[in-house]
């Protein structure tokens, strides 16, 4: 099974929570992005994310001025994060259950971002699909039936 770190995008665009929404929109337009990772303010602070949906639903839809609003006012924080060793199938399941399209990959800091597009274009789930039993054994390796099955 491929892991998140094998399919993630390593070149990640970040922004400060104190930046204006207009600055976020400008950066997203210039780089052709749909989301930016919001930098933590200090080591104990979680990462956040601001997406095009956040901006459209929370700013544009209400006629608010993006030059006066700050990213921290519209971002999602804390956001769902992914461990780089997590299998692609589990990332897909996490995204499905959380109803999200992307998440930062974090281990001792920001490593990248993984999205549904990465799963679709870069993973091997079509060539190497996992059976329900294989996924069960990976999730519950101490189960008797999992110990009888050599992964």
Image: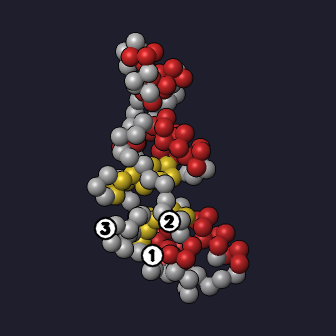
Which of the marked residues, 1 or 3, is nearer the chain's N terminus? Answer: 1
For marks 2 and 1, give the one nearer the viewer.
2
Name the outermost residue toward the top: 148
Q: Tell me which numbered mark, 2 or 1, is placed earlier along the sequence.
A: 1
| Residue position for label 2 | 77
Viewer-closest of 114 and 75: 75
Residue at image position (52%, 28%) is 126
Q: Position of residue 40 (x, y in %)?
A: 38, 69
> Looking at the picture, does residue 82 appear above or below residue 55?
above
Sequence-earlier tag: 2 or 3: 3
Q: Is residue 109 above or below residue 139?
A: below
Mark yes or no: residue 110 visible.
yes
For mark 3, give the secondary structure.
Answer: loop
Identify the element where label 2 is drawn.
loop
> Label 3: how many residues lie within 10 Å, few (<14), some (14-19) or many (20+)?
few
The structure residue drawn at horizontal position 44% and vertical position 80%, both measured from the top left corner, is: 18
Toward the viewer: 48 or 2? 48
Q: Percent x, y for residue 83?
A: 38, 46
The reply to whether the C-beta atoms of the residues labelled 2 and 1 are less than 8 Å apart is yes
Q: Residue 59's quadrant in the figure?
A: bottom right
Image quadrant assignment for residue 2: top left
The percent coordinates of residue 72 (x first, y second) are: 50, 75
* Residue 127 visible at all: no
Q: Nearer the viewer, mark 1 or mark 3?
A: 3
Q: Which residue is mark 1?
A: 17
| Distance between mark 2 and mark 1 Cα atoms | 10 Å
Q: Which residue is mark 3?
A: 43
Locate the N terminus and report the quarter of the image it occupies.
top left
Q: CA distance from mark 1 to mark 3?
A: 15 Å
Q: Residue at x 55, y 77 (%)?
A: 73
């Amino acid at each position: 099974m491929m892991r998140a770190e094998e399919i993630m995008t390593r070149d990640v665009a970040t922004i400060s929570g104190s930046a204006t929404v207009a600055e976020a929109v400008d950066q997203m337009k210039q780089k052709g992005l749909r989301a930016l990772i919001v930098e933590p303010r200090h080591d104990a602070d979680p990462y956040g994310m601001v997406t095009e949906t956040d901006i459209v639903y929370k700013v544009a839809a209400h006629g608010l001025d993006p030059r006066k609003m700050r990213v921290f006012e519209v971002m999602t924080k804390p956001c769902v994060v992914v461990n780089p060793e997590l299998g692609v199938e589990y990332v897909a399941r996490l995204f499905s259950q959380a109803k999200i399209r992307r998440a930062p990959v974090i281990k001792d800091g920001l490593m990248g971002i993984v999205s549904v597009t990465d799963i679709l274009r870069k993973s091997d789930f079509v060539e190497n699909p996992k059976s329900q039993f294989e996924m069960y054994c990976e999730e519950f390796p101490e189960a008797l039936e999992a110990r009888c099955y050599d992964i």
